[in-house]
Image (tube, rainbow, N blue to C red):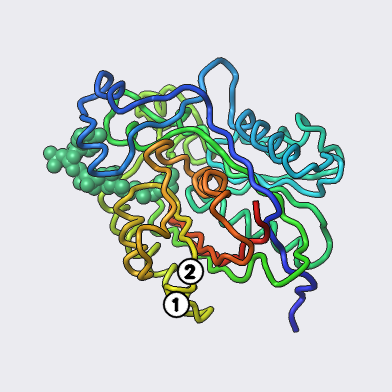
Amino acid sequence: MSSKKYKACISGVHGYVPDYVLTNSELEKLVDTTDEWIVTRTGIKERRILKGELQGTSVLGVRCLEGLLEKTNTNPKDIDLIIVATVTPDMFFPSTANLIADKVGASKAYGFDISAACSGFLFALTTGCQFIESGTHKKVVVIGADKMSSIIDYDERKNCVLFGDGGGSVLLERSNDDTGIQDYILRSDGSGSDMLCLRGGGSLRPASIETIKNKDHYIYQEGSSVFKFAVTNMADISEEIMKKNNLSSDDVSYLVPHQANKRIIDATAKRMGVGPEKVLLNIEKYGNTTAGTIPLCLWDFEKKFKKGDNLILAAFGGGFTWGSLYLKWSYNN
Ligand code: ACO
């Protein structure tokens, strides 16, 4: 017997990116790279960076949540739960969700963080969805945000060109009709953990002079191996959710993909049989903001969506983790 009493829907979305724009030409001055290499291999032209002392991921989360509350006319005291997907929390504890709740005055909400790298927003969204579907909560906020510049080595060309800072948030509420989150598939495989990780600072390798010398506090990625897994798994899982829900490519209004590499997105769209006009892309402006990409994409393209549009959200990330989610958009703008 299903424990689902209600359908959960996204009733608002808002994003935030910092003002500072780090362009490819600026990166050409820092490392041995070219604008041409970056654009042809990834599709990225620029990314945003959160500058200043003591500015953590919570700053991104607070800014996008404040905008969301204003836009949806929501009193912060009415929020029941805040879930933050991030791999760059302000601190290991307390959770970034807790810090954000305090700053926006969500005094009745509890919060926690979810770590699933680039799939983090999908993992957090499906988690939040359960609390709405079961009827225990009425307003759940899901935030995906990362300050990737805090774990990037800007002396090394491989990763610094890929990532940026930013985040987005959605409000989840009970749907009044059949629109909302219809289905999802989530997967993880720890055997890929060594290929994309942050080695230092955890209980395995606590911070030490040694970990600093080894650059263990910067992201480690075997790019071309991860690329193969990303292409296969993101395409497979997007096709799988379409088949599971009897959706043809004509039924899909938009693909909202994680923005890590345009070539991975193109391969996913090809497998789904959807044309470029249905693929939402903003990678050229923001790069890979990890948990931030999907809500930032929803925010950037919100005006395009009409009530009842079928959206497929898809991601692949460190862990490995990957997933797809099918939702019917719930409002007109
Ligand atoms: N500028 C110029 N040359 C570069 C750069 C750069 N920034 N980076 C690497 N190169 C060179 C390499 O050294 C290599 O040179 P060589 O042939 O002389 O050895 C050459 O370019 C090719 O390198 P590859 O790594 O094979 O390049 P590839 O085409 O695979 O592109 C990339 C690299 C963009 C990282 C790609 O592999 C990729 O997108 N991987 C997947 C990323 C991803 O999806 N991650 C998951 C999400 S992230 C998360 O979860 C936090």
Q: Alpha-carbon distance for marks 2 and 1?
A: 7 Å
Residue matched to label 2: 252
In this picture, residue 147 sits left or right of residue 10: left
In this picture, residue 85 sits left or right of residue 246: right
Rendered residue at 43%/56% (across/down): 316
Residue at disc 1, CB closer than 8 Å to ligand 1 = no
Task: Give the camera-side residue of 89 and 300.
Answer: 300
Quadrant assignment for the N terminus: bottom right
Farthest residue toward the bottom? 1
Task: Give the camera-side residue of 97 and 162.
Answer: 162
Rendered residue at 47%/34% (across/down): 148
Quarter of the image for residue 152 reads: top left
Q: Is residue 318 visible?
A: no
* Position of residue 52 measured from the top left corner of the image (x, y, whole percent): 54, 16
* Position of residue 164 measured from the top left corner of the image (x, y, whole percent): 44, 33
The three-letter code of the residue at mark 2 reads Val
For label 1, the SS is loop
For ligand 1, give the image quadrant.
top left
Residue at disc 2, CB closer than 8 Å to ligand 1 = no
> Is the C-beta separation of discs 2 and 1 under 8 Å?
yes
Residue matched to label 1: 248
* Position of residue 64 measured from the top left corner of the image (x, y, whole percent): 64, 36
Whether 100 is drawn above or below 248: the answer is: above
Rendered residue at 59%/27% (across/down): 56
For label 2, the SS is loop
The three-letter code of the residue at mark 1 reads Ser
